[in-house]
Image (spheres, grey):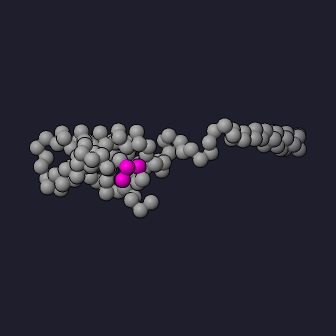
Amino acid sequence: MRCWAITIAVALAAGCGANEAPPAEAPSSASPAAAPAANDPNRRLTKTDCESLASTIIDACNNRGNDRSSEANGWCSEMLRRNEGDHSWIASDCEPHFRYMDAFCFQGANNAHSMMDCDRTVDRTR
């Protein structure tokens, strides 16, 4: 009787392992392999993403209320000049250096000081 119980247990255990997962489907040749996912934290921002981020920064700098620190004044005046004035920030800084995770930091910031912290973390070496 004990022998039968062991045999049944072994057979059941072997049966459970016999169900292999179906092989993964090969990626479709129609989808570009090099295109990063929209929510990939390391993907570079598009021009549209950068324009949206610039708008967020401009709004934060224009709506600072009574916050008049010299550091925030300097950062905001530079960001306003490069976003509202000559629009150089998008092509010279945002598109080549900013990643989705950087934009996520800026979008979560609720004031210019927090945005300055986000700006300090951007890796401008790549």
| Extreme residue in the front direction | 86
* Residue 33 quadrant: top right
Give the image location of residue 35, x and y in percent.
Answer: 56, 44
Q: Is residue 25 above or below residue 92?
A: above
Q: How many marks?
A: 0
Q: Quadrant of the N terminus?
A: top right
**Is the residue 112 above or below the residue 121 in the image?**
above
In-front residue for pair 48/104: 48
Against 56, residue 116 (above or below) is below
Write down the region rendered in magenta.
91-95
Q: Residue furthest bottom?
A: 125
In the rendered view, does 75 fall on the left or right side of 24?
left
Task: Please name whichever residue, 84 or 54, is drawn nearer the observer in this view of the structure.
Answer: 84
Tell me what residue is drawn at x 41 percent, y 42 percent: 47
Query: Which quadrant would residue 83 be assigned to in this image?
Result: top left
15 vs 67, left or right, is right
Identified at 16% across, 51% down, the residue is: 73
Where residue 14 appears, as percent x and y from the top left, is 82, 43
Provide the major secondary structure of the magenta segment. Answer: helix
Is residue 60 highlighted in magenta?
no
Residue 84 shown left or right of residue 34 in the figure? left
**Can the viewer see residue 21?**
no
Q: Position of residue 90 (x, y in %)?
A: 35, 47
Please identify the quarter of the rendering in which residue 15 is found. top right
Q: Is residue 10 visible?
A: yes
Report the residue at 27% width, 47% height from top: 86
| Position in image of residue 121 (x %, y %) | 35, 56
The residue lying at 31 percent from left, 53 percent from top is 119
Give the quadrant of the C terminus: bottom left
Closest to the observer, 101 or 6: 101
